[in-house]
Image (spheres, rainbow, N blue to C red):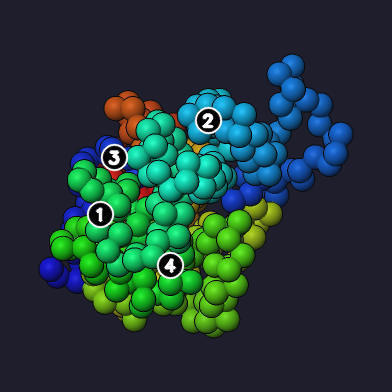
Amino acid sequence: MKPRTFAIITAVLLGVLGLGAALVTPWAPGTAPAAAPGPGGAAATPTGDPAVWTRSTLRNKLMAEMNAADPGVALADLDRITKQLPYTVRFCHPIAHELGHAAVRRYHQDFQKVLSFPHETCAAGYLHGAVEEMLAGSADPEADILTLCAPANKGPCIHGIGHGTMFVTKQDVPAARALCDKFPTDSKRITCSEGLFMQFFAPDEEDENAKANLPADKLAQQPLYPCPEQPPLFRSACYFYAPTYFLSSHDWQDHPEVFAEALKWCLNAQASGGAGDCSRGVGSRTMKYNLDREDWAANQCATAADAWQRKACTQGLMSYYTVNYTDPGAPARLCKKITNPEIAGYCRGAGGLSGTLD
């Protein structure tokens, strides 16, 4: 398969995907987000929920619901909250990961029982976490990566395997890549690589070992490390997720200008052919972190100097929007909210990326 395999395979379905942090309250363009309210600083709603959710308060509520009932109750409530309050999407995926980890422990590694609950919420984060936990406790991960998702072997589960390879190898990219290479087809290897690099650039916050193994010194010294050195089949997924670390390390929560800066940073990948994937990744993260203000997110894409990069960024916007909103009307709904004529045009023509990117 040619070096651009990832981009070719993932450029599917015009504007439609089957599927695919931190507290910030809505803030005006060009300003920093409002500070999180302190204890007693925000009145509770009539339901007893806080006026503004943080990752920790939402996580604690859902874990309590799962302990009192089952994962299905917690996931249904998570789905309800993220639809009512889009800003919570910024941290719903890692919370869903935690629910998946806890469910595997609760049901004593009975994977089929864990997956018996609806688990598509927050781009299948629950499934990803469950797969991570299963592999982390596996006595033979090389064998289990080929059987855990069988017989369906659907993309979201294989993506979860990619996350799990990083748990098994303690963030060792070559070793994790070797596990993904166990899959018999390039398409599954690519899907696995998506989870691998998503986990690499954004280790689960509850996993202190993963964070400790993150090579922060190399990431700080070498733009887009380790993407240029990856084999062609894995390179594009690496570039796509690289902006996740750039944005977090540049404190996007308090510095909204960093989204535009990330597009300039992606130009470092032009020599190695990854600038397009990186720019799509910036668009995807920009939408994920600003799902409650779509037009502002689109205007960040408009800051790019070149049309090709503005288009790639817009494709990323669309990719995440349709990961989060899976109904058929989602693509058109997003494009109608974009006021910049050029970006709106790219939106209407945007093809979806991989059905497992989140």
Estimate the spatial distance between the alpha carbons at disc 1 and disc 2, rounded to whole Å.
26 Å
95 relative position to 226: left or right: right
In the rendering, at what x and y percent does residue 79 appear? 50, 29
Residue at (38% x, 44% y) in the render:
111
Q: Nearer the viewer, residue 64 or 83?
A: 64
Q: Are marks 1 and 2 in contact (CB under 8 Å)?
A: no
131 relative position to 346: left or right: right
Residue 168: mark:
4
- Mark 4, residues whose alpha carbon is within 10 Å: few (<14), some, or many (≥20)? many
Mark closest to the chain's N terminus, 4 or 2 = 2
Q: Is residue 346 above or below residue 9?
A: above
Estimate the spatial distance between the alpha carbons at disc 4 and disc 2, rounded to whole Å.
27 Å
Q: Amino acid at mark 1?
A: Thr
237 relative position to 90: left or right: left
Estimate the spatial distance between the alpha carbons at disc 1 and disc 3, rounded to whole Å.
26 Å
Q: Is residue 160 above or below residue 262?
A: above
SS at mark 4? Answer: helix
Q: Is residue 268 above or below residue 21?
A: below
In the rendering, at what x and y percent does residue 209 appear? 58, 68
Q: Which residue is mark 3?
A: 17
Q: Amino acid at mark 3?
A: Leu
